[in-house]
Amino acid sequence: MTIRVLIADDQALVRSGFRMILEARDDLEVVGEASDGAHAIRLVEQARPDVVLMDVRMPGLDGVEATARLTGRPGAPRVIILTTYDLDEALYAALRAGASGFLLKDVRPADLVEAIRVVARGDALLAPSATRRLLDRFAATDVTPPATPGALEQLTEREREVLMLLARGAANAEIAERLVVTEATVKTHVSSILRKLGVRDRVQAVVLAYDLGLVRPRPSC
């Protein structure tokens, strides 16, 4: 199946570079280029892409607001945020807005292609080291919450444990090793967490965990 991709970035050189990389793959098709968030939204309505590569900072409507408007719609495409700085404050806002992950603009071509394939099949970009560094800024120093918010009461103790490890950027293999279970068991727990919390992927589950206080931000130095 061909994955339809829209590229939204205010720099023409960036757009053309990504287009060249993606069009060299048989399973990827670039269906449009946008120079700002408003243009991206219009093109999404016309071209119906599966995945949008969205620059986080663009003139006019930026990538955060454009992501929020897109992901709140039925049949919304997956959004991968593009950024120059992996600790940009806007990134957490973009994840909260519904992005499925982010990539640095100097990403290797093979990693860019794989990231698109990952989110197109419904997974989320939560394991790369850059994402780990971002999430570490919001990771808890004390992962035991004083009270369990109502939205989290549906989770079992083990599922809350898995969710807290996800919030630290742990991949399935690392969670399995930490909890001394199989990766298949971890995947089952993750699927159950997503279903119970009513979120579509791991990134949104982690954002919800922060928002509801299951994990708390690390204090600024």
Image (cartoon, rainbow, N blue to C red):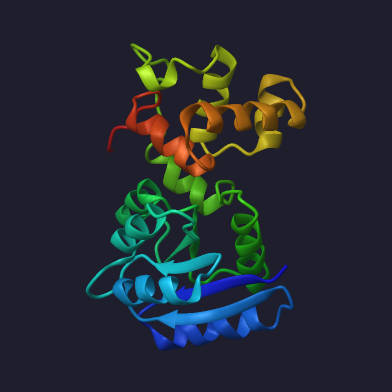
Q: Work out whether residue 173 or residue 94 is closer to the camera in this orientation and state it.
A: 94
Q: Is residue 165 visible?
A: no
The residue depicted at 65 percent of the width and 29 percent of the height is: 175
Indicate whether 155 appears above or below 74.
above
Quarter of the image with the C terminus is top left
The residue depicted at 37 percent of the width and 37 percent of the height is: 138
Indicate whether 26 appears above or below 208.
below
- Tell whether 13 sits left or right of 97: right
Q: Position of residue 94 (x, y in %)?
A: 36, 54
The residue depicted at 53 percent of the width and 70 percent of the height is: 49
Q: How many marks?
A: 0
Q: Work out whether residue 142 or residue 147 is closer to the camera in this orientation and state it.
A: 147
Quarter of the image with the N terminus is bottom right
- Tell whether 45 sits left or right of 111: left
- The picture quadrant where one finds residue 182 is top right
- The picture quadrant where one finds residue 107 is bottom right
- Tell whether 197 sits left or right of 70: right
Q: Is residue 156 visible?
A: yes
Q: Position of residue 217 (x, y in %)?
A: 33, 32
The residue depicted at 63 percent of the width and 39 percent of the height is: 171
Q: Position of residue 110 (x, y in %)?
A: 68, 69
Q: Position of residue 37 (x, y in %)?
A: 32, 71
Which residue is situated farthest in the left direction here? 60
